[in-house]
Image: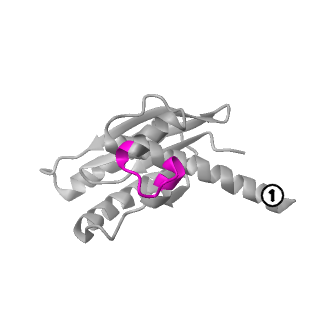
Amino acid sequence: MFEPCVLGVDPGVATVGVAAVALQDRKPVLVWADTLRTSPDMADEARLRVIHEGVRAAIAAHHPTSLALERVAWNVNKVSAMAVARATGVILLAASQAGIPVEEYGPLEVKMAITGQGNAEKAQVRDALARFHGLTEVPSQPDAADAVAVALCHLTRSRLRTAERAAGAR
């Protein structure tokens, strides 16, 4: 009925946050989180390969039933948004190759799901993951913590979708 494990991804080019969050006894548990890093000295295609391989390795190691991805914010900086869009493409490819579905969530949607505030700061999101949602060992690295938040947002949203479908079937 509920998804047992989701891989959350906070896309980027220099750093990509990746986290596996599972449900155990209907409670979220942080299984693993890390940050993939690429050097600005690398060619763009090499950086994208590192991201793709890192996400594929995380999928192989943690066997998620879906991948939750933070949507690119186009309104901030169009040049960096284009680079992040390319990284998002190789992340989507890794999920497709593994046969797992992908859901995308906007930054405000993630913050609302985790803190109840769409304008929450990164530190507030990290604090809410531990205090309100009971996740232990949330990484201090911002991109990895954001990936945990994206995964938890998805688990929360998938629970709501499942409940709505069940209510509609009556």
Amino acid marked by disc 1: Ala
Q: Which residue is mark 1?
A: 167
* Residue 159 image position (x, y, % from top left): 66, 49
Is residue 76 magenta-colored? no
| Quadrant housing residue 77 | bottom left
Q: Is residue 30 left or right of residue 78?
A: right
Q: Who is closer to the viewer here, 92 or 2?
A: 2
Q: Is residue 43 above or below residue 78?
A: above
* Residue 135 image position (x, y, % from top left): 50, 33
| Quadrant housing residue 26 | top right
* Residue 3 image position (x, y, % from top left): 63, 44
Q: Is residue 13 left or right of residue 3?
A: left
- Numbered range of the magenta stretch: 110-123
Instruction: Kindly identify the residue that appears in the image at 32 percent across and 48 percent down.
Output: 16
Q: Quadrant of the C terminus?
A: bottom right
Residue 18 seen in the current view: no
* Residue 70 image position (x, y, % from top left): 43, 56
Q: Secondary structure at mark 1?
A: helix
Instruction: Kindly identify the residue that appears in the image at 54 percent across and 37 percent down.
Output: 133
